[in-house]
Image: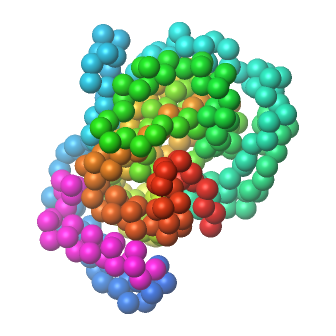
Amino acid sequence: MKPCNVKNSHWLKYNMLFLAEHFLGEKNYNKLLGRTEAKLYADIDKYIKENPIEDDFQILERKKEEWEGKLDHPHFPIVYRGAANDWACTSKWNFEYFSNKYGNEDVTLINNAGLVKDTDQAYDVVKLRDYITNLKAGSKKYLKFSRIVDEKSTLREDFDYEWLKKFRVPFAQNDLFYFFMGGKNTMTPIHDGFATTVFVQIEGTKKWIFYPTNHRLFIGARPRRYNYFYSEANPYNLNDSKFPLLKHAKPHEVTLHAGDVLYFPSFVWHQVENVTDTIGVAYKFAALPSGFTSSKMLATCFLLATKPWLIETMMPWRGDTYKYKK
């Protein structure tokens, strides 16, 4: 689905270039088609300035009486305020709890391309207790996509798993819990992935900035053959010459507090910022029909990914989407 303020011909040409870059690689693409892209972007910029159209994306909020109906949406994020207030994870879990009970567990700090702001961040394995000590001392290293919840059945039992499973769609592949723990002012830059996500905010406050799937044009996302996608654009710097169309993107913000639950579908772009020290868990699953409903182009590029190859993550799909380093 194209952005509503872009001509059909522009969108078609952009997608042809996007697919060409996937196969050519960024260096060859820039050499062969860089000027073509620059001209297209200039034409799109001019057209949008002359033909502004209202934003057609939104973040939904569901009232408590709606928590048992249809829980998902094919294109929009949904917030369920306080849905996890009565779950054991929100009453038991805090930094002291993990330091005391799971402090000797090894956790991996990743530095995957596009998923950390500081590209020099160490890819390291540390004890969870040491990580928490450093976090409280002001460390900006962000523990993300940890599998500790999947590995510890006692932690999984602290969720209302039956309610979470209601988000699953036909043909969904497995389901996994990813653990996140980060200090104040840590963040994950703009990215998206194939999996559908239900995020449970357990401790602290987290700010999310969402862009619709088709705004990959505006945020300057590139097809780098990973099995996830990211942009190096900064939502707070609309005058960056490297992203000439960023000013036309429409960011939507939402803040989560402890006990809130956030759903969002495949390939919805998001930047995540920890307003305070935070703990959260993402419940994820993947389904081909949902991916293609969200974005045929990104789903196709996901299937054609080589970093790693699809067979490494989908047969069986284990959710190791974020384990390929730059």
Residue at coordinates 19% horizontally, 45% vertically from top-left?
54
Q: Position of residue 255 (x, y in %)?
A: 48, 29
* Percent of width and height locating residue 88: 60, 13
Q: Is residue 78 above or below residue 305?
A: above
**Range drawn in magenta:** 1-25
In the image: residue 208, left or right of residue 178:
left
| Residue 57 in magenta stretch | no
* Rendered residue at 30%/45% (across/down): 290
- In the orientation shown, which residue stands out farthest toward the bottom? 32
Where is residue 126, by image quadrant?
Answer: top right
Q: Is residue 135 visible?
A: yes
Q: Residue at x 60, y 61 (%)?
A: 324
Asked which quadrant contains residue 154, the reply is top right
Seen at 44% across and 20% down, the residue is: 162
Which secondary structure is most common in the magenta stretch? helix
Q: Give coordinates of residue 289: x percent, y percent.
A: 28, 48
Residue lying furthest front: 315
* Colouring: rainbow
| Quadrant the C terminus occupies | bottom right
**Can residue 251 be seen in this snapshot?**
no
Q: Is residue 9 magenta?
A: yes
Q: Report the front residue among 110 and 304.
A: 304
Lateral position of residue 142 relative to residue 252, left or right: right
Residue 189, percent across and down? 54, 51
The front one of 155 and 253 is: 155
Taking the image as shown, residue 281 lies to the left or right of residue 277, namely left
